[in-house]
Amino acid sequence: MKKVITYGTYDLFHEGHYNLLKRAKALGDYLIVGVTTEYYDLQRGKLNVVNSVLERVENVKKTGLADEIIIEDHDGQKQEDIQKMKADIFAIGSDWTGAFDYLREFCEVVYLERTPDISSTMLRASKYPIRQLGIVGTGRIAPRFLAEAKFVSGINVRAAYNPNEESVGNFGKKHELEAYWKDFSEFLGRVDAIYIASPHETHYNYAKRAIEEGRHVLCEKPLTFTIKEAEELYELAREKGVVLMEGIKTAYCPGFMQMMNVARSGVIGEVKDVEACFSRLTASHMREMADQKYGGAFLEFGSYTLLPIFKLLGCNYESVEFDSILAENGVDLYSKIHFRYKEALALSKTGIGAKSEGQLVIAGTKGYILSESPWWLTRSFVVRFEDPGKVERYSPKFLGDGLRYEIADFVSKMNGNERMSHCLTREESIAMAGVVEKFMERRNKI
Ligand code: CTP
């Protein structure tokens, strides 16, 4: 019996996929089809897959051509499968010609002619309109967002807004974007969605106005300074039928998601402590240092450190205590926030005037997870146990600087796909606003 094996994503199953499977099947007697997982697709940069892995498997099954369907979830798996399943032929479309010659060591490799003029990418583009996006605020993060947005299909950055005419004019010229500085409504009129990357204290107003006018909003952290404002924005977004998403990029990174899932899997037992640190020494003229009212370490980095705490221990802590070392102008140079849960503890450490080890430690009853700096991008983490010889190492793949995952998720949500809504829930985002609120109350008293 001649076994043929082939792989694909098979998103929005189309005629090209069908033809390929038919031709592959005709090469032998038994066809094995590998379908990629969402996680594997994310890792290899295929960011906007619409159908879930189950739907894609179901569509392959419906053709009646596959004798066996398997899941592909990691690099190097093709060699493993070919050897394990004793495949005689590896078949794939001609768009891959040459790319799999290395498999000739294990079996025959056949590149089959691709069906012209159809692809999942084309179908995705025709199914969903290209979303026109505007950036509010043209500071340090805006150019990074632009660079990363290029890797995400289904979105086009068209315009930029900043009340400072000169800044936005220069930014617009440099990046070939329409520039607006006077009339925010006119700017909104040109876009379907906005990304808010302006100073913290302006987030709420920009987000509110955009949502009221029916625009989708991706807002940099912190979303708001109070629970009430955060709840109001989410409620307004629900009423208007638009997406509101807080841009904490770590939440959308595949490696971080994997680490959270490993922590929840029970391998380290029950989670008893989460300790997260993020520090970056900052020059005195920078906004974080100079802005007496809205600068400081916690407002800058606290969303990152709160994220694993709320993900793993939930949003219902029993008490929270803040401690900060302040600069002369009152901004916090270094802050520690202790959380007490019913059966666990947590600590957030953020710094702009003191440097510490930027690590995340998740302690459990059976072992612990350690992710070293930059854990917020989660390129690697280890699971350790009492026995020092027993170590499990994870090295998730990670592309770009992380923003592309967040942008891809924003696009999926605008397209009505809620698959990744667990990355950062409304409840977690509102709970973070609650901590910011308490922090600001205390700060205003000092
Ligand atoms: N394929 C084909 N003809 C097409 C499209 C795809 O023969 N017109 C083949 C691919 O070469 C591959 C298999 O179908 O062997 C699965 O491809 P997949 O990457 O899932 O589909 P694409 O439509 O190419 O997806 P995308 O646009 O996302 O790259």
Image (cartoon, grey):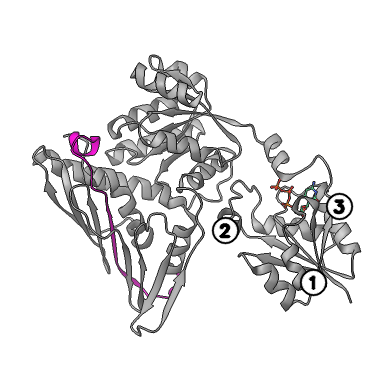
Q: Which residue is mark 1?
A: 107
Q: Are marks 3 and 1 in contact (CB under 8 Å)?
A: no
The kind of residue on which mark 3 rests is Asn
x, y percentage for residue 117?
81, 39
Position above or below: 115 against 163: below
In this view, the mark in front (3 or 1): 1
Residue 179 found in image quarter? top left
> Which residue range is magenta in the image?
265-291
Asked whether mark 3 lies closer than 8 Å to ligand 1, one says yes
Q: Which residue is mark 3?
A: 19
Q: Residues within 10 Å of mark 2 (few under 14, many from 20)?
A: some
| Residue at 29% across, 47% down | 301
The kind of residue on which mark 1 rests is Cys
Asked whether mark 1 lies closer than 8 Å to ligand 1, one says no
Position above or below: 299 against 293: below
x, y percentage for residue 145?
45, 37
The kind of residue on which mark 2 rests is Tyr
Residue 175 among those drawn in magenta:
no
Position above or below: 142 against 35: above
Q: Which residue is mark 2?
A: 39
| Residue at 77% across, 54% down | 97
Q: Residues within 10 Å of mark 3 (few under 14, many from 20)?
A: some
Q: Is residue 413 left or right of residue 333?
A: right
